[in-house]
Image (cartoon, rainbow, N blue to C red):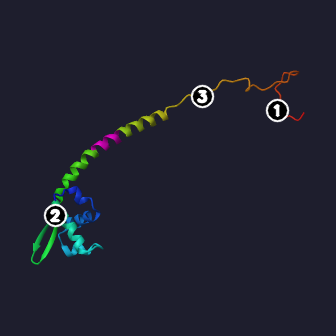
């Protein structure tokens, strides 16, 4: 079965294995000791990583060492790059829009006045012509 890099990085255990062997070459037992799953399960993960070309197994004496070939991750990087460019363009557009909104908010706005109506005018006493006090007791 042909496997690709995306299948390899889809599993968190395989990503962790890649990260471990990217820093230094480790034998299979050292890799397996880092996980709480069986050694055969780790061997299956490593087999998938080797089929994808992300890990190479080197025989040194009686031990087998895993070594990362992270240059194969450029396929993932290239794929992600197209989306990064798209999102950066969207964020730049959003930034310009927000800057425009902020500039519009900082401009002084004329005070809103409403027209006075009859209800706004105080009632006047018909005899004296003075405004009536609506709270007066007399």
Q: CA distance from mark 3 to mark 1?
A: 28 Å
In the image, residue 76 lies at what x, y percent? 22, 53
Tell me the chief SS of the magenta region: helix
Is residue 136 left or right of 12 when viewed as pictured? Answer: right
82 to 129, vertically: above or below: below
Q: Mark 2 or mark 3, which has the lower sequence index?
A: 2
Q: Residue at x 83, y 28 (%)?
A: 132
Q: What residue is disc 2 on?
A: 50
39 to 12, vertically: above or below: below
Q: Residue at x 70, y 23 (%)?
A: 117
10 Å crowding of disc 3: few (<14), some (14-19), many (20+): few
Q: CA distance from mark 2 to mark 3?
A: 72 Å
Is residue 65 left or right of 36 when viewed as pictured? Answer: left
Q: Residue at x 66, y 23 (%)?
A: 115
In the image, residue 13 lies at what x, y percent? 27, 65
SS class, disc 1: loop
Q: Residue at x 82, y 24 (%)?
A: 124
10 Å crowding of disc 2: few (<14), some (14-19), many (20+): some
Residue range corresponding to the magenta coloring: 85-92
Q: What residue is disc 3 on?
A: 112
Q: What residue is disc 1 on?
A: 134
Task: Judge depth for marks 1 and 2 and give the one in front.
Answer: 2
Which image quadrant: the C terminus?
top right
């Amino acid at each position: 079965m042909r496997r690709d890099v995306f299948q390899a990085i889809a599993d968190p255990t395989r990503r962790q294995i890649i990260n471990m062997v990217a820093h230094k070459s480790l034998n299979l037992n050292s890799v397996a000791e880092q996980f709480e799953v069986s050694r055969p399960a780790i061997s299956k993960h490593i087999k998938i990583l080797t089929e994808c070309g992300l890990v190479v197994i080197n025989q040194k004496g009686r031990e087998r060492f895993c070594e990362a070939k992270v240059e194969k991750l450029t396929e993932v990087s290239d794929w992600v790059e197209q989306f990064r460019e798209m999102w950066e363009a969207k964020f730049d557009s959003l930034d310009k829009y927000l800057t425009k909104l902020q500039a519009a908010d900082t401009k002084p706005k004329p005070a809103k006045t409403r027209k006075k109506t009859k209800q706004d005018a105080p009632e006047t006493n018909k005899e004296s012509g003075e405004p009536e006090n609506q709270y007066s007791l007399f």
